[in-house]
Image (cartoon, grey):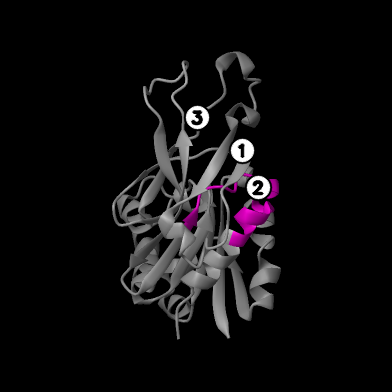
Amino acid sequence: MSSALIVRGGWDGHRPVEATDLFVPFLEASGYTVRIEESTAVYADAAVMAATDLVVQCITMSTISGDELAGLAAAVERGTGLAGWHGGIADSFRNSSDYLQLIGGQFASHPGKEPCERRGDETDNFLPYTVTVTDAGRAHPVTAGIADFDLTTEQYWVLHDDLVDVLATTTHPARPWQPWTRPVTSPAVWTRQWGAGRIVVATPGHSLDVLEHPSVRTIIERGMIWATRAG
């Protein structure tokens, strides 16, 4: 039986409790024992981390201490998997360059609607866009068989490095009210090998309805299985 550690918290707007609770039944049905922590303090517990096969993190923004980050990174290097979605993994711990290196991609923006269409709430950043599976994604266990799909939600613009394996992308068009002058393609789903550990990030997931989209949910569920420590 595999062990999964869910670590959640940070900005309440991403509903970290409700969002992670969506996936607990799947993990339990897949043979995991599930532990839930409301703080990153657990990352500094070497015994817990050594016994953890998969970390599912849902903490938007917030901060992390040096010993907590060192514990997380060391566990991943030894084979603990790390998975998450949206700001819970790609917009965590902005103060930590070491965390950004571990994950390989960082939220930079979610471009908004034309100014005249904005109402002053979160829907100002809800845009229709397509998640496009890459050639590598079509062959990867996390995304194989998933067709390109459309969402209307926050579209993440991600800064990333060359060590990520991009399974799906999304393109931000150049619009008259935006300062960029050509389309920009960002990773929407990626994996990363870090030591013996596997990391999976999916950028869709702002709200529960997005997490319940069949393709998004399948990617996250497959990603958790794939990232789990082998053996």
Label annotation for residue 210: 2
Q: On the image, numbered disc 3 is attached to which residue?
A: 111
Is residue 185 in the magenta section? Answer: no
Q: Secondary structure at mark 2?
A: helix
Image coords of residue 21 (percent x, y) = 68, 61
Mark 1 Cα within 10 Å, few/some/many (few <14, many 20+)?
A: many
Q: Is residue 117 left or right of residue 93?
A: right
Measuring from the top left, give residue 221's x and y in whole percent: 60, 65
Name the residue at the left extreme. Answer: 162
Residue 65 lies in quadrant: bottom left
- Secondary element at image label 1: strand
- What span is in magenta? 201-218
Foreground residue, 3 or 229?
229
Q: Quadrant of the C terminus?
A: bottom left
Could one spot residue 200 in this view of the protein?
yes
Residue 193 occupies which quadrant of the picture? bottom left
Q: Residue at x 45, y 70 (%)?
A: 81
For marks 3 and 2 on the same chain, the one whose residue lies earlier in the sequence: 3
* CA–CA distance in space, label 2 to label 1: 8 Å
For disc 3, the neighbor class at 10 Å (few under 14, some 14 to 19, many from 20) is some
Give the image location of residue 113, x and y in percent.
57, 23
- Three-letter code for the amino acid on which mark 3 is drawn: Pro
Q: CA distance from mark 3 to mark 2?
A: 18 Å
Disc ID at residue 153: 1
Q: Are marks 2 and 1 in contact (CB under 8 Å)?
A: yes
Residue 28 — which label?
Answer: none
Name the residue type under label 2.
Val
